[in-house]
Amino acid sequence: MFRKVLIILLMVVCVFSFTASAYTLDDIEWKSTETNTLHWGHSFENGEAKDDSYDTYVIKVEDFSVDGFASISISRDDQIKTVGFISNGQSFEYRDEEGGQDIKVFASELKLNIDPWTGNMEDPTVKLEIWRRGVPEFDIDIDTEKDEYDPRSPSDPNEVVTTITIKNDGYAEANDVEIIISPASMELADGKLKYNLFTLAKDEIAEPIEVSLEIPHLWEETDLDINVTVRAKDINGDIHEDSEKKTITVQPKAELILTKSIAEELYMDETAYVTVAVRNYGIYSMNSVTIKDTVLSSMELKDSITLEKTVSFKPGETIEVFSYSLKPIKPGSYTSPEAIATFEAPDGKTYTYESEDSKIEINGPYIALTQKLDKTKVEPGTEIKVTVTAKNEGNRDASTRVSSTDFPEGTSFVSGETTFDKVLGKGESGSYSYILKMNDEGTFKLPPATATFIDMESYKGEKISNMPEITVEIPEPEESSTSSGTSNPSNDGSSQPGTESNEEVVEPGFESIFAITALAGVYLAIRRRK
């Protein structure tokens, strides 16, 4: 008896299994894909080119009949799969069990264009609508209370309450629906990470799902993605999947906020006072934090202080790390270097924090004084030209007096100017030149020129120029280039015995006779003119 009952139960299970997996063309929910008007013998392809070639079919009008029918074929891979005869407003379906596709061809308009005299059709046409088996698609909405969470803030929640809404916005019912939630690095506080639905009809919205996720405590600001995937089967058993994500930002559990304070504007004769303070804005201690600061290149440090410290911070603690003063060196608009803090967290990573930029305007004149020589290496007795130039590279006018009062020993002043007195505006220059004679040998360093200035704010100062060097020396005599092979060691001009000479021999006294004859000729010429 038991054996019979068992066989009956197995048969029932098999019947229900077959019923659940099988479907007919009447069970299909169709989706319109394409509409085309075709002439006799014309065709078109329906579907998209995919790795699976079964998705593309050729629809062709094979023939028309005068009684109002069109013969339509459906082909795949150059083989006709089925032929249907349809009239206006009719359709036929084809189920490709091998390819897992279902197609419906509907004639929305058929024109035979029959000639009333001959009864023959003249260019008949049919307008075909192609339908495919619809499949489920999912619209996934992920909603959180906030987009940004800060574990340091007492007013912020400790959990991310997430509401997930799923809608089947496809063209067919979904079966065996799975909803999978991936919460990145967040731990589940309440709810589940996987839900199942037996079915979800077309246009149906599932009951909202709510899960709570613990906000993680991280050392740096981090974007976290909550991913939701919906996977389901269609009537043919094919799996369809859609995904969506929601990004939230989690602030760090501890953060160093550096504040560097310095005056925004000051004059050249003023002092800038700087303070660097650091606050641990967080809920965790930060130990062995290295703080470094840098002095602006246009200023100099007045205090004896090392701008690097290692300190530790309790949660919420603020420490003044540096306090020092600076003296301006040159006017202009500057950006003070940031103070920097570095911290190695227990996770082994090093985190860096910086203060905000500080803009500084330094006002006042700045006189740049230079001396230039037209020559730097000369012989004794040579004159050189010295040019002295003063330029105001600051941003305020200044009454400027420049003078050259000393000259090196072994030199003498020849001519020129050795002073000028002028108001130099921003970017303006003034100069003078003089001549020095270099009398003695040696290396001479030109004494500096001096400039004194004062502006309308009673800021005054003095500048000293550079000291160029001059080398004075007698050049080495040049060696004789006469070849020893052309010299004649004989004092009487005669050739040595056994040798030949190419030189012309001039008798003694011939030069004197020639000179007297020439003078006599000149005297006679003058007498004749008289």
Image (tube, rainbow, N blue to C red):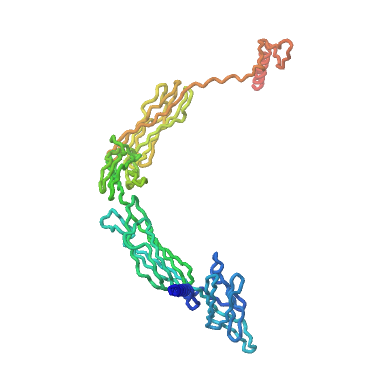
Q: Residue 157 vs residue 349: left or right? A: left
Picture quadrant of residue 410: top left
Q: Nearer the viewer, residue 42 or 356?
A: 42
Q: Residue 233 vs residue 316: left or right? A: right
Q: Nearer the viewer, residue 281 or 5?
A: 5
Q: Residue 17 vs residue 314: left or right? A: right
Q: Where residue 159 sits: x, y (%)?
A: 30, 59
Q: Residue furthest bottom?
A: 117
Numbered circles on residues, count? 0
Picture quadrant of residue 455: top left
Q: Nearer the viewer, residue 333 or 53?
A: 53
- Above or below residue 238? Residue 336 is above
Residue 73 seen in this snapshot? yes
Point out the image quarter for the N terminus. Answer: bottom left
Q: Nearer the viewer, residue 241 or 354?
A: 241
Q: Where residue 323 sits: x, y (%)?
A: 27, 40
Q: Where residue 100 sits: x, y (%)?
A: 52, 70
